[in-house]
Every structure is written in structure tokens, then in C-alpha cells.
Image: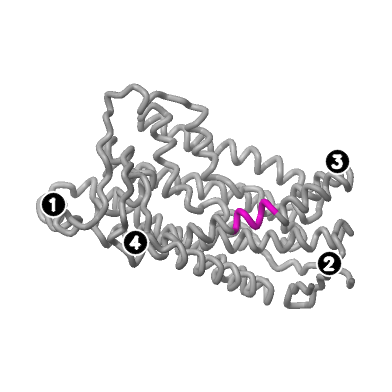
Amino acid sequence: MSTIKFKRQIDLKNGIFFVVTTIIGSGIFITPKGVFQYSGCSYATTILIWIFCGLYSMLGSLCYSELGTTILRSGGDYAYIKLGFGSTIAFVYLWINIIVIKPAAQAIISITFAKYLIGTFTVNAIENENCNRFDYSTDLSTRLIAIVTICLLSWINSRDVKWALGIQNAFTILKLLALGIIISSGIILFYFDEYWYKWIAPKIQASQQNLPKGGQIDLNATEICRPIYSLSIYSGLFAFGGWNFLNIITDELKNPYKNLPKAAIVGILISTIIYVLTNLSYFLILSTNEILSNDAIALTFGRKIIGSYGNSFVSFSIAISTLGSLNATIFTTSRLFCMQLKRNNYLRFSECFITNVSLRFFR
């Protein structure tokens, strides 16, 4: 096995994009309902909880930045566990991640991507009896698309780091653009509501006849909006998952002593601002009943704004967002695989080597 050495190709801009795209996945489109419901259906409390989750994630990121600049090794948790607790525990942690956790995460993300990609073109989704989820009745197609997507992104990541980073940056820009449209549309329609409801809303209502409708929620039921702040914070923190992924690729960062903490802080700050503004946009357009009637609050928002086109737009936005997260997960998982080879914590069935432009795996 030849010496494994990564080229430092990730600058500050790519690092920020990497943090943003790993954090912003499908969470902002789905979890706002949980944050809102368990905050007691309070708009102000919901916004404060989102800000708290962002600050909490930033504190964790600052701790990891200190670890990453003190222990200048790629691998993230694996490198820190090995230094603190020894090779045996690090070996177990690494292989649980490689064999179980990371593949399962990639499978879930890829299936989510495939489902919403199909939902982009399949407007007449079948509504289940609880009005909470949509069954597109395309299980085989969903799995095939998920498998092809994982294989394609794995091949791209194996060919060239620059290819992977280019795709990652493109996904980040697209998801920020989609969220920017959601934010701006909510604010604009709030200020021009008279024109909107007089001329455009009737046309949208006519186009929504074949779309699934959310069920009515009894807001007088105390258990619906009973505040459970721990669950509200948990739902919010779920949307910030991935803030520590940059530590896995420390060896590839240019000037990691400066760029690692900067990228982490700026990336989380951007994500927090986007999350808060997106929730404000939801609150400006949707009623409490509409927010609670559907798990995927963004779909309800899109349908109310522009009917079936809004449903397709939001589905496509979720698909793009999850695709970027999937690419980041594949990118970091490959580095974990190489770290175990580099540190000699490997099972002898594979060999990995690095060339100037590519990272390839051979059985």
C-alpha cells in the first residue's frame, strides 16, 4: 500500500459552501412543524428556538475547530477518539460508521431525494388517511433512482476532488437560490396581499382541485400545542446536523488553522440566518392550522403560493437540497475509509491509493 497523502485543494470559499450544504438538507423543509408545535404554537418562541439551535451548533463547531487546529489530522471524531482512547475504540467507531451508519444515512438521503424528484413531476400524489405524508406509489422507481444516484456521485467523487467540489458548490448555490425564492415570495406576498388574494388566489384555488389537502387540526385540543421545549429544540438541532463534517477533511483544507474555524462559523451563521428568514416567510403566509396540518410545511407553502407549480417547485428544491447533502456524505465517507488505511486500522480486503488527481478504491 502506497503512502496516502491528500492535496490541500479546499479553500475558505469551498469550506463555507461545504458547511452550508451539509447543514441545509431536507430539514428546513420538514422540521419547522415540529419546532413550531412543540414550542406551544408560538411564533416568537419558534424563532428564538431556531436562533438558539444555531448558536448551540456554533458553540459545538467552535469546540471542534479547536480540536481540528490542535489535532491537525483528518478523520474528525475518529482521529480524536484514537488519540484520547486508543486504537481499539477508534477502530470500532470507524468501522461502525463505514459499514452501518454512513451507508444507512446515504440510503435514507438518496431515497428522500428520489421520492421528491419523482414528486416534482407527479403532482397528483396519493394522500394517506392522516394527511401527513404522500405515497407516490413508485417504490421500485424510487429505489432505482436512489441506487443510480449513489453510484453516479461515488464515481464523480472517485475521479477528481475538483469535480466533487464543483458539484458541491453548484448544489449549495441552487438550494440557497430556492430558499431565497421562498423567503422573498413570502415577504413580497405579505405586503401585496390585497392584490394577491383578489386576482391570483382564485386561479390558484382552481388549480388545486387535484392536489392533496391537509386535514383540519383542532387547535382547542390542549395536546396539539402543548409546549415541550426539549422536543422543539431537538427538532431544530436535527436541521443543523452536519456542522462537524469539515473536521473529517482537515488534511485537504488550505491553511486549516485559519480556514477551519472561519468556514465553520460563517457556514453556520449563513445557515441560521436562512433558517430564521425561511420560518418567518412560512409564518407570514400560512395560518397555524396550515402549519400543523402537514409534516412537509414547505409543500403547503408552495401550494398556497402558486398551486401545483408551487408543489413541484418545493419538491424539486428538497430534491436538490438532499442531493447536495448526499454528495457531502459520500465525500466525507471516502475520507474515513482512507483514514483507516492510513492509520493501519483496516480489515485486509481492500487497498487504497492516491494519485495527483484522483482517489480510487480497489478490492
Q: Is residue 237 left or right of residue 88?
A: left
Q: Secondary structure at mark 3?
A: helix
Amino acid at circle 2: Phe
353 or 184, which lies in front? 353
Kindly identify the residue that appears in the image at 57 percent across and 65 percent down. 168
The local crowd at label 4, few if under 14, some if 14 to 19, many if 20 or more residues have their Cα within 10 Å, is many
The local crowd at label 1, few if under 14, some if 14 to 19, many if 20 or more residues have their Cα within 10 Å, is few
Labels 1 and 4: the sequence-earlier one:
1
Question: Which one is in front in this view, the residue at disc 2 or the one at disc 1?
Answer: 2
Residues at marks 3 and 2 touching, judged by CB atoms closer than 8 Å: no
Q: Disc number at residue 313? A: 4
On the image, the x and y values in percent for residue 286 come to: 27, 42
Mark 2–mark 4 Cα distance, whole angstroms, equals: 45 Å
**Magenta segment includes 104:** yes
Residue to which mark 1 is pinned: 195
Mark 4–mark 3 Cα distance, whole angstroms, equals: 47 Å
> What stretch of residues is rendered in magenta?
100-106
Amino acid at circle 4: Phe
Dominant secondary structure of the magenta stretch? helix
Q: Disc number at residue 335? A: none
